[in-house]
Amino acid sequence: MSVQQSSNKVIERLFALRAHGTTVRGELLAGLTTFVTMAYVVFVTPNMLSGTGMDPGAVFVATCLGSAVACFLMGFYANWPVGLAPGIGLTAFFAYSVVGEMGYSWQIALGAVFIAGVLFVAMSLSRVREWIMNSIPMCLRYSMGAGVGLFLGLIGLKSAGIVVPSDATLLSLGSFREPPAMLGALCFLLIAVLSFWRVFGAILISILLVTGIGLALGLVEYGGLVSKPPSLAPTWMQVDIRGALDLSMVSVILAFLFINIFDTAGTLMGVAHRAKLIEPDGSIEKLPQALKADSTSSVLGAFVGCPPVTSFVESAAGVAAGGRTGLTAVTVGVLFLLCVFFAPLAGMIPAYATAGALIYVAMLMMGGMSHIDWEDLTDAIPAVVTMIMMPLTFSIANGIALGFLTYTALKLFTGQHRQISLSLYILSAIFLAKFAFL
């Protein structure tokens, strides 16, 4: 038996390609497609975390390694064609709310990521996850995603200087005569146009193109493309679990947990349908394994210095290209590993280039609000409160807490108490205690 035949047998045994109607070539191409659509995360994450005190080189390597390990877990254990990386919304919450606004150290923030990950794993091993997911009203689920989108959009607009602080009006429009604002807006428009025409890797192309323009204008200093990977030591095993066990961190941990749960559920369900992983009886093939792989990734990622790692909806692009098995995810993981050699390129990417990507992603995340029942004010008002209070308080945790409290109060005082689940009462009591005593 030749080496190629032996390797084909191993691949077939690991991923069951024939049973899923796919080939090695098709899976590799799908993996490349998924990677190109989500590779922007290796540039965006270090930029977003630059103000937390974390070493940019170590964050870049941590992002690549955390993403690679998560993809390998998803591929080998769950055999799903899903790419994983630090979630953009969760990274924004980590950097701008927990560390920036609330003043916690990034080590304590990593501790909160670890605890939320452990809780997610425990839920994935039991029926608690189902109980919580089913008991959270749909209007709050949709508004959480939209609120995170608005939060991301505000961060992107602020980073590019398109929106600036104002003593008179709180916020004001920046000057488009300034190169960062002009190039940030250009990056956003490029992504939107290229995405409309379904250009392969629209976000990545736009980020690199705008960086090139900045380089030509002398706004970016050339630092090379390839080098030895930076040291991971500054973020390795820096998780402060004890510091994250403070009572004031409860809402932070719950925010990390809920956003991860609902993001993951939505992404995996969507990918399962596209990849034809639905069984005749309606069950989803290896869904428990996929959830465990996703939740475990956040726990492991915290040790290397990653914000919460989650399944990326961009995986749908790889599935559309033919990805059906875990070989697609493994391919994405290998490509993330190779990225560690491109640290100089990542270091050159300016904030205004990644800001364009954040604004674009924010727009996409607003789509969930179309599912809100606007005729029922007891659903619509809590949804709007959740959505707008995230950017206005610059805190995802506060937006979730205020939305939950508004929903519970409105349902309770309009005679609809049967729509309030036990878990919602418990969470509302926790959030009320937080505002009253912390």
Image (cartoon, helix red, strand yellow):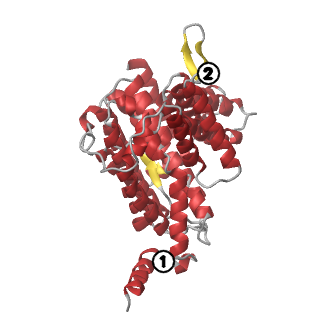
- In percent of width and height, residue 56 lies at 35, 38
User: Looking at the image, is 111 positioned above or below residue 272?
Assistant: above
> Helix, strand or loop at disc 1?
loop
Dot 1 crowding, Cα within 10 Å, few <14, some 14–19, many 20+: some
Which residue is at a point 50% across and 56% down the rendered structure image? Answer: 35
**Residue 283 in view (yes/no):** yes
Q: Which residue is mark 2?
A: 177
User: Looking at the image, is 315 positioned above or below residue 170?
Assistant: below
Which residue is at a point 46% across and 60% down the rendered structure image? Answer: 332
Task: Residue at the far bottom: name it.
Answer: 1
How many numbered circles are shown?
Answer: 2
Q: Disc 2 or 1, which lies upstream in sequence?
A: 1
Q: Amino acid at mark 2?
A: Arg
| 3D distance between C-alphas at marks 2 and 1 | 56 Å
Dot 2 crowding, Cα within 10 Å, few <14, some 14–19, many 20+: few
> Helix, strand or loop at disc 2?
loop
Q: Is residue 372 left or right of residue 319?
A: right
Task: Residue at the far right: name it.
Answer: 375
Which residue is at a point 58% across and 77% down the rendered structure image? Answer: 21
Task: Residue at the far top: name it.
Answer: 168
Residue sitting nearer the eye, 319 or 110: 319
Q: Amino acid at mark 1?
A: Ala
Which residue is at a point 49% across and 30% down the rendered structure image? Answer: 219
Q: Is residue 79 left or right of residue 284?
A: left
Q: Which residue is mark 1?
A: 16
User: Closer to us: mark 2 or mark 1?
Assistant: 2
* Mark sitting on residue 383: none
- In percent of width and height, residue 117 lies at 37, 46
Residue sitting nearer the eye, 219 or 320: 219
Task: State which quarter of the image contains the C terminus.
Answer: top left
Task: State which quarter of the image contains the N terminus.
Answer: bottom left
